[in-house]
Image: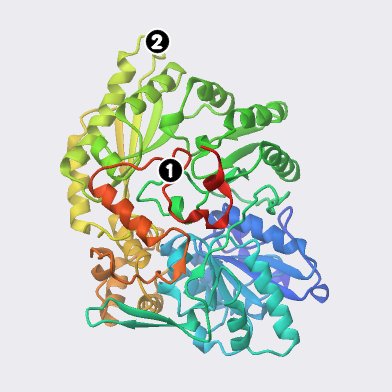
Amino acid sequence: MDNKRFEQLLLSVQKPGRYSGGEINSVVKDKKDIDVRFAFCFPDNYEVGMSHLGMKILYSQFNERKDIWCERVFAPWPDFEAVMRQNNILLFGLESREPIKDFDFIGFTLQYELSYSNILNMLELSGLPLLAKDRKDFTPLVVAGGPCTCNAEPIADFVDIFFLGEGEQSDLEVIDLYKKCKKNGKSKKDFLIEASKIEGVYVPSLYDVSYNDDGTIEKITPKENAPMPIRKRIETDLDKTYYPEKFVVPYIEIVHDRAVQEIFRGCIRGCRFCQAGFIYRPVREKSVETICRQAKAICESTGYDEISLSSLSTSDYTKLEPLLNDLLDFTEKDKISLSLPSLRIDNFSDELLEKINHVRKSGLTFAVEAGTQRLRNVINKNITEEEIIRTCKTAFAGGYTAVKLYFMMGLPTETYDDIKGIADLAQKIVDTFYEMPNKPKGKSVSVNISVSNFVPKPFTPFEFHPQITREEIVAKQQYLKECIRSRKITFNYHENKTSFLEGVFARGDRRLSAVILKAHEKGCKFDSWDEYFDLDKWNEAFAECGIVPEFYANRERTYEEINPWDHLDYCVSKGFLIKENEQAKLAVTTPNCRQKCASCGANVFGKGVCFEKR
């Protein structure tokens, strides 16, 4: 289709900027000069995908190589999808506007389980068979990476290769192997067998899964000498790891429309519900010098006037104060604001508040997770009520009047007393504000409590626990509403239907591929968006496939059971997870990684926090 006709069609949709391409710092190459075309697909809309740091890193890294052209692809919003289907437009890369079915690789990033139906919809819009076994040609190869690959089984039937862990090296090694195999006339099967030997590469077609009569897994069997288990890859030295000097600057507003600077990977804390805190171990930090150099380069190349520091727990960065001093040297001079998300209550100080007052004036947000000390000990949050109140006092004394607290509902061992504890804690914070002699004059306090639903995830100590039922979640949400007495407290909670489906996929196995395919045929897509999520269609798909979703979401698992992800090695041992789960039942906490090594298994890499002096 010629550009003029294409641009006319764009005028009929809500946000043409999602599909037009041509943004500042986007990369266009001559096809004659390249060997490999890679479609980097984010299975959600442009605004969400363009906010994702992993896409920014790999897009730039791939395009720095002269032999690779990486283009961006996003899930078309339903209005543009209708235009595509009416006009026989195949899904295309933004840079070239050419169909991605003609590329060598189609790569998806798996950030959340509710994007799975979009993956199938994007493959269909590309004009490709959905099932990997039906794609007989060598190319395009469908690959995927991201946090959800730690249990990739629910979409194993659709993907040729999964990348476990961090992909900066393994992605390029697979691309180089592809070039070699293609040059030597090897088959797709030959290539997949060779690729499986690269550390961090999982080829699901090389593993058979058999089941017991009760529906649990009997065994997982490798074929063609494929490795067992398959170990994740990590970047051991973040100062030497690739980081882009440029970001593509969107024409339309995106979710996180600012420069993002990664300061470390991993987390020392070990909160027992948090998958990211375990699968990204061990903690590895960048130096202050590297962070400042990279942040400055990104601002200069993009024109952004805000930098957000990216990590799982920003205030755990060991050199945070000198980092902020150095960053403020140029951000204040250049009128660039600085955002510090992911702060912890237990290391929030007057000194940190003083620095924050330089960089932002909005309300403060903290993840408390549980309303009682007993339950905070169960989940290994390692913060006390005294620390919470003291931190709020510090913030109020510094002029803040708004505090947002994140909690979870449905945690293992939770009681109604723990639910009431959320309301009680919020009320104590309100009372603390009004009891302060130096509170901001003429202002009232605002305490916002946001409550999400617990979903048991692989590679966490709570992977064995059931998710509570939707009926229990509704009852607990209603009870918490009744416990809140003050108008100064605002209560927001998460839709429980999507949490249920997330729980099914999080601990699901390969049999769910048939369900996802059936749901796609029924029109399921954009399941993380309330306006498009349709649980009735999903329930129909489960029923037609003869699968009971509660088997995956609401069932407790024994320590002896073989899990769908047990052949994947994220270097956090099952023995460690079992030990941590037993500690949780006793409400006993585990010190963080900088206080004492818990022997989780992440020291196999020989780098990071595991080898720091304590």
Residue 527 visible, this angle: yes
Q: Which residue is drawn at 72% across and 90% down?
A: 185
The percent position of residue 291, horizontal first and vertical second, equals 67, 40
Q: What residue type is labelled 1?
A: Arg
User: Which residue type does callout 2 highlight?
Assistant: Asn
Question: Looking at the picture, how far across and down is residue 459, in whole percent?
Answer: 40, 59
On residue 421, which mark appears?
Answer: none
Is residue 89 left or right of 525 when viewed as pictured?
Answer: right
* Residue receiving disc 1: 269
Q: Position of residue 98 (x, y in %)?
A: 69, 74
Q: Quick one: label 2, few (<14), some, or many (20+) residues within 10 Å?
A: few
**Residue at position x 53%, y 21% in the image:** 351
The answer to whether 251 appears left or right of 269 in the picture is: right
The quarter holding residue 567 reads bottom left
Mark nearer the N terminus (1 vs 2)? 1
Q: Position of residue 436 (x, y in %)?
A: 34, 13
Q: Residue 438 carries which label?
A: 2
Task: Work out whether residue 22 or residue 174 is closer to the camera in this orientation and state it.
Answer: 174
- Residue reaching furthest to the top: 437
> Which residue is located at x 31 percent, y 16 percent?
434
Q: What element carries label 1?
A: loop
Q: How far apart are marks 1 and 2 (CA)?
A: 34 Å
User: Looking at the figure, which quarter contains the N terminus?
Assistant: bottom right
| Relative vertical location of residue 451 with respect to residue 429 in this rendering, above or below | below
Using a 10 Å C-alpha cutoff, classify the residue at mark 1 as few (fewer than 14 neighbours), some (14 to 19) or many (20 or more): many
Mark 2: which secondary structure? loop
Image side of residue 200 versus residue 600, left or right? right
- Residue at the spot 65% in from the left edge and 60% down from the top edge: 58
Q: Can residue 76 be seen in this view?
A: no
Q: Judge depth for marks 1 and 2 and give the one in front.
A: 1
Colour treatment of the image: rainbow
The answer to whether residue 37 is left or right of residue 602 is right
